[in-house]
Image: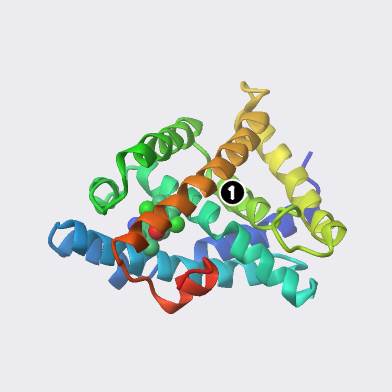
Amino acid sequence: EITKEQQAFMKVIVDSYNRHQIPQDVTKKLLQEQYSAEENFILLTEMATSQVQVLVEFTKNIPGFLSLDHEDQIALLKGSAVEAMFLRSAQVLSTKMPNGHTEVLEERIRNSGISEEFMTPMFNFYKSIGKLHMVQEEQALLTAVTILTPDRPFVKDHPAVERLQEPMLEVLRKLCALHHPREPQYFARLLGRLTELRTLNHYHTEMLTSWRMNDQKFTPLLCEIWDVQ
Ligand SMILES: CC(C)c1onc(-c2c(Cl)cccc2Cl)c1COc1ccc(-c2ccc3c(C(=O)O)c[nH]c3c2)cc1
Protein backbone atom coordinates (compact mmCIF):
# COMPACT_ATOMS: atom_id res chain seq x y z
CA GLU A 1 0.00 0.00 0.00
CA ILE A 2 2.93 2.42 0.74
CA THR A 3 4.65 2.98 -2.62
CA LYS A 4 8.41 2.73 -3.16
CA GLU A 5 8.85 6.50 -3.50
CA GLN A 6 6.69 7.09 -0.38
CA GLN A 7 8.96 4.69 1.49
CA ALA A 8 12.07 6.58 0.31
CA PHE A 9 10.41 9.92 1.19
CA MET A 10 9.51 8.63 4.67
CA LYS A 11 13.02 7.23 5.22
CA VAL A 12 14.57 10.68 4.64
CA ILE A 13 12.30 12.22 7.27
CA VAL A 14 12.61 9.40 9.84
CA ASP A 15 16.41 9.16 9.49
CA SER A 16 16.70 12.93 9.91
CA TYR A 17 14.41 12.79 12.96
CA ASN A 18 16.55 10.08 14.57
CA ARG A 19 19.81 11.83 13.68
CA HIS A 20 18.82 15.18 15.14
CA GLN A 21 18.47 14.75 18.90
CA ILE A 22 19.61 16.86 21.85
CA PRO A 23 23.20 15.82 22.68
CA GLN A 24 23.65 13.50 25.69
CA ASP A 25 25.79 16.00 27.59
CA VAL A 26 22.81 18.39 27.57
CA THR A 27 20.05 15.91 28.46
CA LYS A 28 22.11 14.20 31.19
CA LYS A 29 22.19 17.52 33.06
CA LEU A 30 18.48 16.90 33.69
CA LEU A 31 19.56 14.13 36.08
CA GLN A 32 22.46 15.96 37.72
CA GLU A 33 21.59 19.52 38.65
CA GLN A 34 19.80 20.15 41.93
CA TYR A 35 16.08 20.91 42.13
CA SER A 36 14.90 24.47 42.61
CA ALA A 37 12.43 26.47 40.54
CA GLU A 38 15.33 28.68 39.47
CA GLU A 39 17.62 25.79 38.47
CA ASN A 40 14.75 23.95 36.78
CA PHE A 41 13.92 27.01 34.67
CA ILE A 42 17.56 27.41 33.63
CA LEU A 43 17.80 23.71 32.68
CA LEU A 44 14.53 23.79 30.74
CA THR A 45 15.73 26.92 28.93
CA GLU A 46 18.88 25.08 27.94
CA MET A 47 16.83 22.09 26.76
CA ALA A 48 14.46 24.27 24.74
CA THR A 49 17.36 26.15 23.14
CA SER A 50 19.08 22.92 22.20
CA GLN A 51 15.76 21.48 20.96
CA VAL A 52 15.18 24.50 18.69
CA GLN A 53 18.62 23.97 17.14
CA VAL A 54 17.76 20.30 16.60
CA LEU A 55 14.39 21.30 15.09
CA VAL A 56 16.01 23.66 12.59
CA GLU A 57 18.37 20.92 11.39
CA PHE A 58 15.51 18.41 11.15
CA THR A 59 13.37 20.89 9.21
CA LYS A 60 16.12 21.62 6.69
CA ASN A 61 16.03 17.91 5.74
CA ILE A 62 12.30 17.87 5.03
CA PRO A 63 12.11 17.40 1.22
CA GLY A 64 11.28 20.70 -0.44
CA PHE A 65 11.53 22.89 2.68
CA LEU A 66 14.70 24.69 1.56
CA SER A 67 13.10 25.58 -1.80
CA LEU A 68 10.32 27.52 -0.02
CA ASP A 69 10.48 31.32 0.15
CA HIS A 70 13.07 32.16 2.84
CA GLU A 71 10.73 34.36 4.85
CA ASP A 72 8.14 31.57 4.78
CA GLN A 73 10.78 29.14 6.07
CA ILE A 74 11.29 31.42 9.10
CA ALA A 75 7.54 31.91 9.58
CA LEU A 76 7.00 28.11 9.59
CA LEU A 77 9.78 27.54 12.15
CA LYS A 78 8.61 30.34 14.44
CA GLY A 79 4.99 29.25 14.12
CA SER A 80 5.64 25.59 14.91
CA ALA A 81 8.53 25.60 17.41
CA VAL A 82 6.37 25.41 20.55
CA GLU A 83 4.12 22.69 19.09
CA ALA A 84 7.12 20.65 17.91
CA MET A 85 8.64 20.92 21.38
CA PHE A 86 5.39 19.81 23.01
CA LEU A 87 5.46 16.78 20.69
CA ARG A 88 9.10 16.05 21.51
CA SER A 89 8.72 16.48 25.29
CA ALA A 90 5.51 14.40 25.10
CA GLN A 91 7.49 11.61 23.49
CA VAL A 92 10.12 11.79 26.24
CA LEU A 93 7.48 11.90 28.99
CA SER A 94 5.42 9.03 27.58
CA THR A 95 8.14 6.58 26.59
CA LYS A 96 9.58 5.46 29.94
CA MET A 97 13.15 6.56 29.09
CA PRO A 98 15.62 4.00 30.46
CA ASN A 99 17.84 6.82 31.71
CA GLY A 100 15.11 8.08 34.06
CA HIS A 101 14.70 11.30 32.08
CA THR A 102 10.94 10.91 32.12
CA GLU A 103 10.34 11.41 35.85
CA VAL A 104 13.07 14.01 36.11
CA LEU A 105 11.76 16.05 33.17
CA GLU A 106 8.20 15.95 34.53
CA GLU A 107 9.41 16.99 37.98
CA ARG A 108 11.36 19.93 36.57
CA ILE A 109 8.51 21.11 34.34
CA ARG A 110 6.09 20.92 37.28
CA ASN A 111 8.43 23.07 39.38
CA SER A 112 9.72 25.78 37.02
CA GLY A 113 7.44 28.72 37.71
CA ILE A 114 4.64 27.60 35.40
CA SER A 115 1.33 28.49 37.05
CA GLU A 116 -1.12 25.75 38.00
CA GLU A 117 -3.70 26.80 35.38
CA PHE A 118 -1.33 25.70 32.56
CA MET A 119 -0.26 22.44 34.21
CA THR A 120 -3.62 20.73 33.64
CA PRO A 121 -3.91 21.31 29.86
CA MET A 122 -0.19 20.60 29.41
CA PHE A 123 -0.23 17.28 31.24
CA ASN A 124 -3.59 16.30 29.73
CA PHE A 125 -1.90 16.67 26.35
CA TYR A 126 1.06 14.61 27.51
CA LYS A 127 -1.33 11.89 28.70
CA SER A 128 -3.34 11.92 25.45
CA ILE A 129 -0.16 11.58 23.37
CA GLY A 130 1.06 8.74 25.60
CA LYS A 131 -2.18 6.82 25.06
CA LEU A 132 -1.60 6.84 21.28
CA HIS A 133 1.57 4.73 21.57
CA MET A 134 2.95 6.30 18.38
CA VAL A 135 5.71 4.42 16.57
CA GLN A 136 8.84 6.38 15.70
CA GLU A 137 7.87 6.88 12.04
CA GLU A 138 4.56 8.40 13.12
CA GLN A 139 6.34 10.74 15.54
CA ALA A 140 8.75 11.91 12.84
CA LEU A 141 5.97 12.41 10.25
CA LEU A 142 3.65 14.13 12.73
CA THR A 143 6.43 16.57 13.66
CA ALA A 144 7.13 17.29 9.96
CA VAL A 145 3.38 17.75 9.30
CA THR A 146 3.20 20.18 12.25
CA ILE A 147 6.14 22.23 10.96
CA LEU A 148 4.67 22.38 7.43
CA THR A 149 1.32 23.76 8.53
CA PRO A 150 0.33 26.33 5.85
CA ASP A 151 -1.81 28.62 8.01
CA ARG A 152 0.88 29.94 10.34
CA PRO A 153 1.08 33.71 10.88
CA PHE A 154 2.96 35.62 8.13
CA VAL A 155 3.20 32.67 5.69
CA LYS A 156 2.79 34.22 2.21
CA ASP A 157 2.74 31.25 -0.18
CA HIS A 158 0.18 28.91 1.45
CA PRO A 159 -0.19 26.63 -1.61
CA ALA A 160 3.57 25.96 -1.70
CA VAL A 161 3.47 24.76 1.93
CA GLU A 162 0.30 22.71 1.31
CA ARG A 163 2.04 20.97 -1.61
CA LEU A 164 4.76 19.82 0.82
CA GLN A 165 2.42 18.92 3.68
CA GLU A 166 -0.05 16.89 1.60
CA PRO A 167 2.28 14.00 0.63
CA MET A 168 3.42 13.75 4.26
CA LEU A 169 -0.19 13.54 5.47
CA GLU A 170 -0.80 10.79 2.88
CA VAL A 171 2.20 8.76 4.09
CA LEU A 172 1.17 9.35 7.72
CA ARG A 173 -2.36 8.11 6.96
CA LYS A 174 -0.99 4.90 5.41
CA LEU A 175 1.47 4.43 8.32
CA CYS A 176 -1.40 4.67 10.80
CA ALA A 177 -3.38 2.02 8.91
CA LEU A 178 -0.28 -0.17 8.78
CA HIS A 179 0.71 0.11 12.47
CA HIS A 180 -2.77 0.34 14.00
CA PRO A 181 -4.88 -1.98 11.80
CA ARG A 182 -7.55 -2.49 14.50
CA GLU A 183 -8.02 1.25 15.02
CA PRO A 184 -9.49 2.72 11.81
CA GLN A 185 -9.90 6.10 13.55
CA TYR A 186 -6.27 6.25 14.69
CA PHE A 187 -5.20 8.73 11.97
CA ALA A 188 -8.14 11.01 12.83
CA ARG A 189 -7.19 10.86 16.54
CA LEU A 190 -3.61 11.75 15.62
CA LEU A 191 -4.77 14.84 13.70
CA GLY A 192 -6.99 15.71 16.65
CA ARG A 193 -3.82 16.06 18.73
CA LEU A 194 -2.64 18.77 16.29
CA THR A 195 -5.77 20.75 17.15
CA GLU A 196 -5.03 20.32 20.86
CA LEU A 197 -1.48 21.56 20.16
CA ARG A 198 -2.84 24.83 18.78
CA THR A 199 -4.58 25.54 22.07
CA LEU A 200 -1.32 24.87 23.93
CA ASN A 201 0.30 27.62 21.83
CA HIS A 202 -1.98 30.14 23.48
CA TYR A 203 -1.22 28.81 26.97
CA HIS A 204 2.47 28.95 26.14
CA THR A 205 2.29 32.61 25.18
CA GLU A 206 0.83 33.30 28.63
CA MET A 207 3.50 31.14 30.28
CA LEU A 208 6.15 33.30 28.59
CA THR A 209 4.48 36.48 29.80
CA SER A 210 4.33 35.29 33.41
CA TRP A 211 7.96 34.15 33.29
CA ARG A 212 8.96 37.54 31.94
CA MET A 213 6.99 39.24 34.68
CA ASN A 214 9.26 37.45 37.13
CA ASP A 215 12.22 38.77 35.14
CA GLN A 216 13.24 35.29 33.93
CA LYS A 217 15.86 35.39 31.17
CA PHE A 218 15.73 33.44 27.91
CA THR A 219 18.53 32.74 25.41
CA PRO A 220 18.96 34.89 22.25
CA LEU A 221 17.71 32.01 20.07
CA LEU A 222 14.50 31.63 22.11
CA CYS A 223 14.00 35.42 22.17
CA GLU A 224 14.26 35.42 18.39
CA ILE A 225 11.94 32.48 17.78
CA TRP A 226 9.36 33.66 20.35
CA ASP A 227 9.65 37.41 19.61
CA VAL A 228 10.40 38.27 23.26
CA GLN A 229 12.70 40.96 24.79
C1 LIG B 1 12.39 28.19 27.93
C2 LIG B 1 11.92 26.97 28.70
C3 LIG B 1 11.73 27.25 30.19
C4 LIG B 1 10.61 26.49 28.12
O1 LIG B 1 9.59 27.34 27.81
N1 LIG B 1 8.56 26.60 27.36
C5 LIG B 1 8.93 25.30 27.36
C6 LIG B 1 8.09 24.21 26.96
C7 LIG B 1 7.56 23.36 27.92
CL1 LIG B 1 7.89 23.63 29.58
C8 LIG B 1 6.76 22.26 27.55
C9 LIG B 1 6.51 22.03 26.19
C10 LIG B 1 7.03 22.89 25.21
C11 LIG B 1 7.81 23.97 25.62
CL2 LIG B 1 8.47 25.00 24.42
C12 LIG B 1 10.24 25.20 27.83
C13 LIG B 1 11.04 23.95 27.96
O2 LIG B 1 10.99 23.29 26.69
C14 LIG B 1 11.54 22.03 26.56
C15 LIG B 1 11.81 21.56 25.26
C16 LIG B 1 12.38 20.29 25.07
C17 LIG B 1 12.70 19.47 26.16
C18 LIG B 1 13.33 18.16 25.95
C19 LIG B 1 13.58 17.67 24.66
C20 LIG B 1 14.22 16.43 24.44
C21 LIG B 1 14.59 15.68 25.53
C22 LIG B 1 15.25 14.40 25.70
C23 LIG B 1 15.73 13.50 24.65
O3 LIG B 1 15.59 13.81 23.45
O4 LIG B 1 16.28 12.42 25.03
C24 LIG B 1 15.36 14.15 27.05
N2 LIG B 1 14.80 15.22 27.71
C25 LIG B 1 14.34 16.15 26.81
C26 LIG B 1 13.71 17.38 27.04
C27 LIG B 1 12.43 19.95 27.44
C28 LIG B 1 11.84 21.22 27.64
Report if residue 20 is visible in the image: no
Q: Is mark 1 within 8 Å of ligand 1?
A: no
Task: Say which residue appears at 34% left-offset and 60% top-offset.
Answer: 213
Q: Nearer the viewer, residue 19 or 36?
A: 36
Q: Nearer the viewer, residue 226 or 19?
A: 226
Q: Residue 2's spot in the image, x, y percent?
A: 77, 44
Furthest residue toward left: 34
Q: Residue 204's spot in the image, x, y percent?
A: 46, 51
Report if residue 11 is visible in the image: yes
Task: Say which residue appears at 82% left-offset and 54% top-offset.
Answer: 162
Furthest residue toward right: 159
- The residue to which callout 1 is attached is 137
Question: Residue 155 occupies which quadrant of the picture?
Answer: bottom right
Up/down of 50 relative to 211, above or below = below
Quadrant of the rendered image holding ligand 1: bottom left
CA neighbours of label 1 inside 10 A, class few (<14), some (14 to 19), many (20+): many
Question: Residue 196 occupies which quadrant of the picture?
Answer: top right
Q: Is residue 30 left or right of residue 155?
A: left
Q: Nearer the viewer, residue 56 or 119?
A: 119
Q: Residue 104's spot in the image, x, y percent?
A: 23, 50
- Secondary structure beneath dot 1 equals helix
Task: Say which residue appears at 23% left-offset and 47% top-offset.
Answer: 107
Quadrant where the N terminus lies? top right
Up/down of 206 relative to 78, above or below = above
- Residue type, numbered disc 1: Glu
